[in-house]
Image: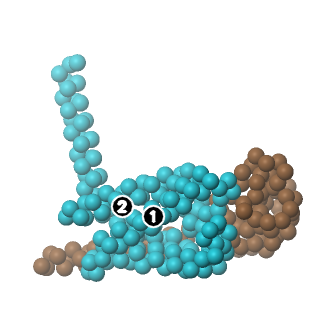
Chain colours: A cyan, B brown
Amino acid sequence: MHIYDNIYLGKTSRFLRAAYQRILRWLPIVSIYGYALLYMYTGYDKLKNIKSFIKGNESIPFIGQYAPLIGWGVPIAEIVLAILLVFPFLKLRLPALWASVILMGIFTLYMALMIKFVPDRLCHCGGVIESMSWTLHLIFNIAWLGAGVYAIKKLNVN
Amino acid sequence: MKTKIKNSVMSALLGVAVLGGAVLMQSFGEKTTETFTFVRVSGDSNSIDPLDYEYHPTNQCIANNPQNNCSADWSESSTPNIGDNPTGTLQPASLKKGSRLQ
């Protein structure tokens, strides 16, 4: 290997390391505002279509009997969490982030179970999210879950 | 102290912008086309009864069961909400084969 190649590789690796560190530095704050955007978007969409959301929940095995409770509870919880995540005065950002990640975990578990066990699936996920394929939706959720866990870890350290 | 308050205010303003953006995205992101695919949720495999169909943008048909149709296109005068039955006209030859949703 020529000496110039080493210099070039050194520059590239320094650039990549700097980019990686920059991403890690901004990831917690991007995750927090990303969760807020996502939950406000899907929560508002579900509230706008509340009748069909409740009706759709009625057809989900095991939880269908709680459809009205879930139908109102999920979008309200999403909107409340979105608000708590973005307002720094309330000192509730970390608990709200915990709750957001747990809620995302529940959604992800639901999706994984549906993909594994239910051949004919139904998703009332709201807006453009509902137009994703199930596999893409699962990857999307897992990515958010990972980002949320990382953000909690960093906020706990700070 | 001043910096802390300033940061908090900036953070809150950014928060308001994010939440407002989410609401605007939802409001302006709705479809405006006139033909929509509705998924069959009940009835016979060749049903053309609007009450057997609901609007679900995922169009999650499993198109490997030739015994059943699973969806059909309907012309709508306004954008349906998720779960709505069709109120418009069935598009000819738009029935899709496959398992229907439960």
Tell me which residue sits at (25%, 56%) in the image.
A25
The image quadrant that residue A131 belongs to is bottom right
Mark 1: few/some/many CA within 10 Å (<14, 14-19, 20+):
some
Q: Are marks 1 and 2 in contact (CB under 8 Å)?
A: yes
Task: Return the x and y of residue A51 as percentages of the image width and height.
Answer: 65, 79
Q: Residue furthest top?
A: A1
Image label count: 2
Indicate the quadrant containing the N terminus of chain B: top left, top right, bottom left or bottom right.
Answer: bottom left
Visible residue check, residue B43 = yes
Q: Nearer the viewer, residue B57 or A51?
A: A51
Secondary structure of residue under mark 1 = helix
Taking depth in this image into account, of A9 and B65 the one nearest to the observer is B65
Q: Quadrant of residue B94?
A: bottom right
Residue A12, quarter of the rendered image: top left
Residue shown at 36% from the left, 57% from the top: A147
> Residue most toward the left?
B1
Location of mark 1 (residue)? A104
| Chain ID of residue with mark 2 | A
Checking the image for residue A148, the label placed there is 2
